[in-house]
Structure formats: structure tokens, C-alpha cells
Image (cartoon, rainbow, N blue to C red):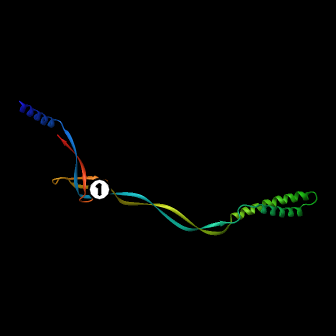
Amino acid sequence: MKYIVTIIALTMSVFTTNVMASNATATIDGTVISSNAIMQDQVKNVPQESCTIVDVPIYGGGQPTAADAITGAIIGGVLGNQVGKGKGNDAATIFGAIIGAKAAEENAKKKGTQIVGYKQVQQCEVTYIRVTESVVVGYETTVELYEGMIHTFVTHRSYRVGQSVPVRMTLTLN
């Protein structure tokens, strides 16, 4: 009777294993046979700076100064005084001073737009060049597990041939 119960239990476990699938996970040490780089082309925009020496104009004068206005007012006042007679002499002097100051101011502005020389300046610009280069994106590693069983997988690092590496394997039993 004892043997019958054991045989029935063994039969039930075999029957249950055949009907239901189960997974078994194990870590096995394998020996690296090869580890080859996986290359991929990537396009990059590489900056390139180019510089040249250029002549830049130098403008003379520019902003009128108080000295320009005073000088113009004095000259204009003297001329206005020479033109005016009698009671209009004072008005002609003041009017000449105002016109002289304004004329001196306009003359200084006009000189500011005249080129009086050149200086050399370095000017640079950045352009981008499209460059295609091959980069390593992973490694195809092949290991021998046991009794000639070979397994190949992709890794993110390179392994040395002959190096021992742990390989986690999941076996599905049907």
C-alpha cells in the first residue's frame, strides 16, 4: 500500500508538470569566446570658426562740443554786429550769434560722418559642418556555457576573450 501511494504521487507530479508550464531561473558561469563592437553611424554638427582681418572706417568729429558752439556764436555775433545799424544792431548781434552757434553745430555733425582713416579688426564667424562618424553602441558577446552550449547576447561593455561571466538564464518547462 505504501508503494501505491508513492507511485500515485509521482504520477500526479509528472502529470501536473506536463499540464502546467513552469519557469526555472539559474545563473551559469560562461567563458567569453568573442566580444565584438556593434557600430552605428551618427551625424553631428561640428562648429568651425573662421576669422578674417577687415578694414573698418574711422569717422571724424561726431558730437558737437560746447567749444564749437561758443566759437560759432562769437563769429556769428561779430558778423551780426557789423551788419546791424542803430537800434537793430543788438538784435542783429544776437541773431548772428544764434545762427553762428547753429552753423558750428551742424558743421561738427557733418564732420562726424566723414571717414578720417581705417583700422584693422579681426572678425570671426562660426559655421557648422555635418560630419558622419561611427560610434560603438554595444557589444555582441558570445559565451560557451557548458558541454558546447553557446549563447550570444548584446551587452553595453566589452569582455575579454577567456573571461568568465555570469549568464542568467530562464528555462521554461512545458
Where is residue 153 shown, x and y percent of the image?
A: 25, 52
Identify the residue under disc 1. 139
**Mark 1 residue crowding within 10 angstroms, few (<14) / some (14–19) / many (20+):** some
Q: Quadrant of residue 16?
A: top left
Say whether residue 44 is left or right of residue 145: right
> Can you give x and y, in whole percent of width and height, for residue 116 in the image?
67, 69
In the picture, measured across the screen, residue 40 lies left or right of residue 72, that is: left
Q: Residue flagged by tag 1: what amino acid is it? A: Tyr
> Seen from this angle, which residue lies furthest right?
86
Q: Position of residue 149 (x, y in %)?
A: 17, 52
Across and down, in percent, residue 135 comes to 35, 58
Going 37% across and 60% down the picture, which residue do you hit? 133
- Decide: is 73 above or below 171: below
The quadrant of the rendering that contains the C terminus is top left
The residue at the point 13 percent across, 35 percent down is 13
The quadrant of the image that shows the N terminus is top left
